[in-house]
Image (cartoon, helix red, strand yellow):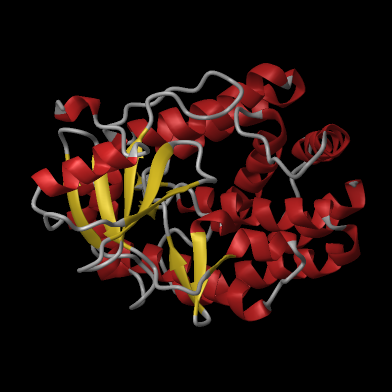
Amino acid sequence: MPHADLDIEHPEELIAYMREAGRLEPGETPRIEILAGGVSNKTVFFEPEFGQTLVLKQALAKLRVKADWFSDPARVHREAEGLRALIELAPVGTITPLAFEDERVHLLAMYAVPKPHENWKELLLAGRLESGHVAAFAELLGTIQRRAHERREELAARFADRRFFESLRLEPYYAYAAEHVPEAAGFLHALIAAARARTLTLVHGDYSPKNVLIHKGRLVLLDHEVIHWGDPAFDIGFALTHFLSKAHHLPAQRTAFADAAILFWNSYLEALGEVPWRGDLEACAVRHTLGCLLARVAGRSPLEYLNPDARARQRAAVCALMTSPPPSIPALCGEFLAQL
């Protein structure tokens, strides 16, 4: 079987590939499970009889969403580079170590997070919101961005390629939403220009609860294919969007999720410390939060838990706030909920 034809979601092909690569003993039968949930990769749990359990990822050229959305499968190697950097920048135990990568088939393998573990997004949607998890999520981001800034002479060049951020975030989130929500187009195009101009530290680009597993109370961060040197406010806005959208989705816990968003911001600032670009960070984060809140109901990848009525309500609330953005994160949280 030619390597170029490898499909890791076909167990017989994956077993043959792993045996040929010397990563599986002859006669050894691994346990293979196709993992669901992602739109941009094929992801497989691979547990051999001997040796360490792996999670393998193979990037898709066409993402699994309703709208046409394409991106170069070579981005999986950006994720591998991200894993190599983040294992040094993030607190111990919060990043899965890279096992290997194969550029011939656009594949990477990382060591699996031990079981039992839970996906944080699923916990939040079930209403299981814990302040300790929120604070740890914020501290993880602040620590990565502070330490990356300290190593900027090395990392800025290493992560200067921003094409996957363009194809997986700026175009499908902001530009697509601008095309479909004309009243927000000016705001979103200005936001795109600002994001391109602000190159300050390492940006994860997919900083979301869906990319966090919780094992023995510790958060483990996954999915780094959009990582680049850029605007830290994007990660903040991306993360805050999930707290505020869940506040919208779960009315009984609306205040709790808004409080979590504020806790996230304050804990992030504490971990970030005194960086030169801290002064205008909050204003930029407010704008990215508004942009992402709109993109997640009007972009190529809408939040699946918001129904059409809720998406229309969130769109109207955000467009109203874009005319005069709130001056702070706490004000944004209060005004967003008031608009709902």
Q: Is residue 97 left or right of residue 204?
A: left
Residue lying at 49% horizontally and 82% vertically, measured from the top left: 216
Residue at image coords 66%, 51%? 241
Instruction: Please state which of residues 34 and 180 is positioned toward the viewer in this rendering.
Output: 34
Depth check: give the residue in front, 101 or 140. 101
Quarter of the image holding residue 312?
A: top right
| Count of numbered circles in the view | 0
At 58% from the left and 49% from the top, the residue drawn is 238
Vertically, is 208 above or below 317?
A: below
Measuring from the top left, give residue 317's x and y in whole percent: 84, 40
Q: Quick one: 76 or 49, which is closer to the camera?
A: 49
Residue closer to the observer: 202 or 302: 302
Using the rendered image of the protein, determine whether residue 157 is visible from the camera's viewpoint: no
Furthest toward the front, the residue is 27
Visible residue check, residue 75: yes
The N terminus: image quadrant: top left
Q: Is residue 46 left or right of residue 38?
A: left
- Image coordinates of residue 204 in percent, x first then y, are 42, 52
The correct choice, above or below, for 164 with respect to 136 in the image is above
Q: Is residue 82 above or below residue 323?
A: below
Horizontally, is 146 left or right of 136 in the view? left
Image location (x, y in percent) of residue 176: 60, 22
| Residue for point 62% across, 30% down | 188
